[in-house]
Image (tube, grey):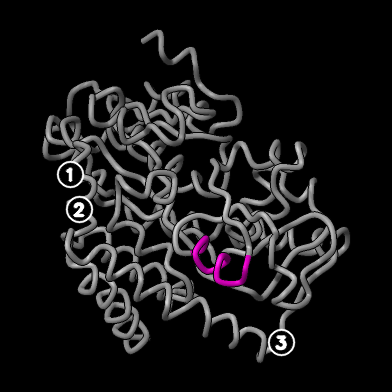
Amino acid sequence: MKLFGKLVAGATLGMSLLGGAAFAQSVEGPEVFWRISMWGNPRALSAGMEAMAEHVLEETGGNFRIQIFYGGQLSSARENLDGLAVNAFEGAAICNFYHPGRNPAWMVFSLPFLPLGDPEIDRQVRARLMEHPAIVADMARWNAMPYVSGLLPQYEILGRGDAPTDLSDWNGLRVRAGGGLGSAMEALGAVRQSLPAGETSTAFQRGAIDAAAFPFTYAHVAFGIDEEADWFTSNLTPGTSECGWVLNRTAYDALPPQYQDLLMSQRERIMEIQQAAYAAQDEINLPAFRENLVEVIYSDDQLEEFREVAGRPVWEAWIAENQDDFDAQGLFDAVWEYAAEAEAAQ
């Protein structure tokens, strides 16, 4: 149990561990300790998983303990899949565009202008995609299984220097943006830069990049991008990505069925907590952005032009590139099908 001395300061799980013996047990089972690998600090993205870990601890009377290790203590952001493959830990957060060749189907989440702008539709679509055969197969290659979406909000961009008030102003700007978002920015003439979130603030300080796309607004603040920026876009909404949570397949299969059921019963609650945490951050961050940075708002005509040059061409190129490896067209169509069904059900 020496690992419990390494609890990250500020993690909500810490207080739960101290009182674990006092919990009323409703799920019987053996003592199990799981480690989840995560980069960066505790933030809105991890709020749901922290709540899940606390709930599991309570329900099992302290027997099933889950700790999220932050700051890349267990693995770097780009190597979490490798760690799962060799059973180095029991779960991890992954960002699909950190290793596109390793999770090619997951790159569908990063295509620009998908119908995921409505938070409720977004949650329903992503929950169903976590069970799509192509998404499951990507993780199976790494001894992993999809658990729950990170539900990252739509991206916006913060940057230094002159604000790009016209689409032509993006020409030549070095923009941190991965996956299809990176392709969308390249369509505007920007130079795509791909680097982990934790390295972005330093890249600004070194003058290596001019702008960075992150989930708006929480991630910009979580990684200190707002401290480096002069301006921000507020309605570009080029798309999002998937920084979701996956579990080690070997570890999951080794759990007793009641622990497996307990984990799976928490997925909807995790997503609800994450979305609430993102919204709470926006209420704090957006006014601060408007007070301290130049806000860039594009006209409807400019946004339509952006979608024309960076929407369908990027979709078609991604499908053509991947169709021989998996049913890329079917996966892409599933996104729109699930979104239409979710909208019809509202």
Query: Which residue lies most toward the top here?
Result: 2
Which label number is shown at residue 299? 3
Q: Position of residue 84 (x, y in %)?
A: 27, 31
Q: Residues within 10 Å of mark 1 (few under 14, many from 20)?
A: some
- Quarter of the C terminus within the rendering: bottom left
Name the quadrant containing residue 277.
bottom right
Percent coordinates x, y for residue 321 in the rendering: 29, 64
In the depicted structure, whether residue 233 falls above or below residue 337: above
Question: Compared with residue 122, is residue 267 higher up or lower down, i.e. above or below?
Answer: above
Q: Main secondary structure of the magenta part?
A: helix
In the rendered image, the residue lying farthest to the right is 291
Q: Are marks 1 and 2 in contact (CB under 8 Å)?
A: yes
Q: CA distance from mark 3 to mark 2?
A: 39 Å
Between residues 38 and 239, which one lies in front from this camera angle?
239
Q: Which residues are magenta?
A: 181-189
Dot 3 crowding, Cα within 10 Å, few <14, some 14–19, many 20+: few
Which residue type carries mark 3? Ser
Percent x, y of residue 165: 78, 75
The residue indicated by pointer 1 is: 140
Q: Which residue is mark 2?
A: 136
